[in-house]
Image (cartoon, helix red, strand yellow):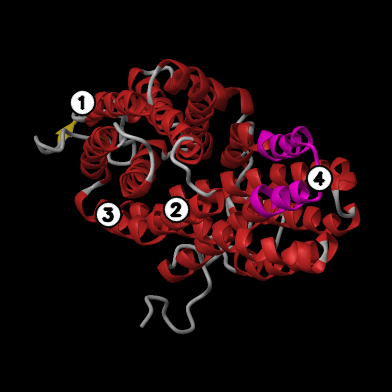
Amino acid sequence: MTDTAAGAPRAFTDPGWRRRVILAVYGYQGLVAGFGLTALPNHLAALGAAPGAIGGLAAMIGLPWALQPLWGPVVDGHGGFRMGRRRAWVVAGMAGALLCLALLPLAGDGPAAIPRLGPILMAHAVFAALLDTALDGMIIDRTPRARLGQATALTRMGFVGGTALGAASFAWAIPALGLPRAALLLLLLGAVLATLPFSVREAPGDALLSLRRRPEAAAAARLPLGRMLRRLLFVMRRREALALVALCIALEFATAVFGVRLAIEMIQAGGWDPAALSRLQGGIAVLGGTLGALVIGWWSDRAGPYRVLLRLLGLCAAAYAGSAWLLVGPPSGLPSSIALALTSIVPALVFVSLAPAVMRSSRGAAAATRFALFMAALNLGSALGAASSGPVGALLRPWQTVLLSAAIFAGCTLVALRPARLFRDPEAGTVPASPRNGSVSAPAAETVLR
């Protein structure tokens, strides 16, 4: 049974097609991530490539994602296409990404190919970041408020599933077929997934493929860049926006500062086999990113993302505190496995409830830019946490580090007790209420960038 009516046009506004497009695009991104960030580095390492060269390759792939918010004003300020306000950029990003993949077989194989592989994969990441920004904007614009949790869960499912498939399949394909032929296989799989965003309209009346603008929407679509950025800066300077940015940084910092340390301790002090640990980490990621994400998305749509976010933040604080008790001894055996699961799955589920709350607060003419800025704050927190894991680990024992993370999550929970500190809901014209006290109306028109 499906909620897509027979004979209905393929449009993102249709729930069935929306789910398919989200899974296809994020599955594509995960597939390439599994290829470029797991299977390819492992292959190059096995052939004797220098760690610095492999690290440089990973850095080139990651740099365009750090600059992703720069695509926001482009996507937000240049809409009004007959293909739909966002879909024109979705198609452009997907087409550019596939073109870059088509160049990969020409790069060769082995460590000597790294100087050619790096720029190609970096260019791919530029287009993939555009694709991601545009699709996020389309989700915010076209998904009903009561289905944003489901949409976020599907993004997580697609990316995690694609990453697992890409890492596993290309770990076999690259050595067995050679890198050029494996790259052709990646291009083929990517092209199959791309048929959905290429063939599904943004709305029923939109053109399937056209770069022409709608005459009636041209004036509204060409929002001057300077004016939009000034309005965006005005909104982002507000107390709740700054508080939300700080929350995003703190959450990812608390996750990364301990996550990197735990894996190292389990191998070096706990005697874990690296391959066995990698399999355990992969299984945990798939479990949290599929079944867990679906459950949290369903719950978020029914109970509201603010309420679910508060519950999960409190659960994170409890999970990290419990993990500290488990890690008082050597990080080996079942206790360390449980600690790894608790500190991996629960924080990942927080994102599934945080994203729809941020999407609600981001709606308006600059939706893609605002959402990309908040996601950039998450990435910044993760980078700061990973960079701090060494110095923090030199000062604190593992159980003390996880207690520090638990304290950060507890602080975030206290802040989230009053969602109005973090979010404004421009579509509803209200600030979200405390989950314990019902709804509170308040003007929010100043946060709408129209």
Q: Which residue is drawn at 61% across and 23% down?
A: 226
Residue 414 numbered mark, or none: 1
Spatial separation of the CA atoms under disc 2 and disc 4: 29 Å
Closer to the camera in the image, 142 or 184:
184
Is label 4 in contact with label 3 (beta carbons under 8 Å)?
Answer: no
Give how far across and how far down residue 412 sits, in percent: 28, 27
Q: Residue at x 85, y 61 (%)?
A: 180
Asked if residue 380 lies in the magenta stretch, the reply is no
In this view, the mark in front (2 or 4) = 4
Spatial separation of the CA atoms under disc 1 and disc 2: 27 Å
Please state which amino acid type lies under the numbered disc 1. Answer: Leu
Closer to the camera in the image, 194 or 411:
411
Magenta highlight: main SS: helix
Image quadrant of residue 399? top left
Spatial separation of the CA atoms under disc 3 and disc 1: 23 Å
Q: To which residue does mark 2 refer? A: 285
Q: To which residue does mark 4 refer? A: 48
**In what quadrant of the picture does the N terminus appear?**
bottom left
Bounds of the magenta span?
36-63
Q: Is mark 3 on a helix, strand or loop?
A: helix
User: Mark 3: few, some, or many residues within 10 Å (few <14, many ≥20)?
Assistant: some
Give how far across and how far down residue 372 sits, in percent: 52, 36
Looking at the image, tell me whether mark 4 or mark 1 is earlier in sequence order. Answer: 4
Asked if residue 55 lies in the magenta stretch, the reply is yes
